[in-house]
Amino acid sequence: MSEAIPPGRVLLAGATGDLGGRIARELRKRSVAVTAIVRRGTAADRTARLRALGVDVVELDLDSVAEVAATCTGTTCVVSALNGLEETIIGTQGVLLDAAVAAGVPRFIPSDFSLDFTRTPAGSNRNMDLRRDFKARLDVAPIRATSILNGAFADMLTGQAPFILFGLRRVLHWGDVAQPIDFTTMDDVAAFTAAAALDPATPRVLRIAGEQTSPRGLAAAAS
Ligand SMILES: NC(=O)c1ccc[n+]([C@@H]2O[C@H](COP(=O)([O-])OP(=O)(O)OC[C@H]3O[C@@H](n4cnc5c(N)ncnc54)[C@H](OP(=O)(O)O)[C@@H]3O)[C@@H](O)[C@H]2O)c1
């Protein structure tokens, strides 16, 4: 992707979250103007790091298309790093999409950041189903969209959902021990998202992986 294109302003939702904060940092590293929209009443200490990065933090009602659209004016790309279930991924993210369209924003990056949900069977994974439902809505909206499919966050290997049980010297898995699994670190996903937000030539879906391995490969690596 080209990074030589002059940066516009990026509007970011979910910037108080883990991935969103990292995307804000990567955008600011590239000297991009960033507006972070946060829920009204968000505690000042939750936005202090964003402000220190030079991010413009705007508190508003994320259920109001009119309020979000007014803040979208002059934005070249809306990036969503929202996290949640239907209320958020379809509801709040839907408001964000409607507002971006109403304000004439040319590009939208939804909060996908997942394995390839375009190929998972319906009903097999709630979170993938929500992303597919949102994609159907996004694909008929008059805005150019880019989904980033990065597999699992590599950070989860030893964090939130440990696959490697160091104490037991075991890798936790089910199914095929040779099943390929994509991993990308959150920092790499954030850097990639920032680059994609600045590049109007990105395709509809970007499938990326920092590493592809399997339960057997994880066991070998951990050993
Ligand atoms: N591929 C993987 O392995 C993997 C792992 C984890 C996450 N993810 C994905 O990465 C993305 C970001 O996740 P994360 O872990 O960074 O999330 P997170 O730390 O939980 O942050 C979520 C953000 O969304 C905001 N938010 C949630 N519901 C909202 C609502 N109704 N209205 C307004 N703001 C709302 C939160 O705002 P407040 O601060 O106000 O609550 C926060 O800024 C999501 O798509 C998630 O599914 C992928």
Image (tube, grey):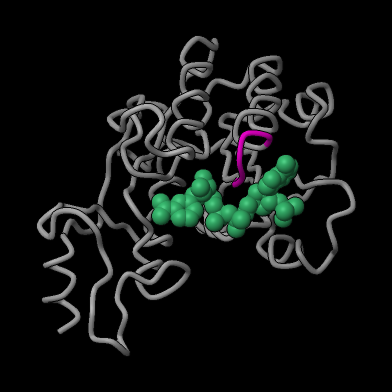
Classified by dominant secondary structure, the portion drawn in magenta counts as: loop
| Vertical position of residue 61 compared to residue 150: above or below | above
- Quick one: 50 or 146, which is closer to the camera? 146
Q: Quadrant of residue 99?
A: top right
Q: Which residue is located at x 14 percent, y 54 percent?
A: 176
How many labels, in total? 0
Q: Give the x, y percent position of residue 183.
A: 28, 57
| Vertical position of residue 197 compared to residue 39: above or below | above
Q: Which residue is located at x 61 percent, y 45 percent?
A: 84
Q: Give the x, y percent position of residue 48.
A: 76, 66
| Vertical position of residue 210 compared to residue 91: above or below | below
Which residues make up the magenta segment?
83-87
| Residue at the extreme right | 41
Q: Is residue 101 left or right of residue 196?
A: right
Q: Is residue 89 left or right of residue 157?
A: right
- Residue 30 in sight here: no
**Quarter placement of the C terminus:** bottom left
- Quick one: 207 or 159, which is closer to the camera? 159
Q: Give the x, y percent position of residue 157.
A: 34, 70
Q: Quadrant of residue 63?
A: top right
**Quarter placement of the N terminus:** top left
Q: Which residue is located at x 84 percent, y 28 percent?
A: 67
Q: Quadrant of residue 174?
A: bottom left
Q: Is residue 135 left or right of residue 162?
A: right
Q: Give the x, y percent position of residue 193.
A: 44, 45
- Residue 156 in sight here: yes
- Quick one: 138 or 25, which is closer to the camera? 138
- Quick one: 15 or 215, which is closer to the camera? 215
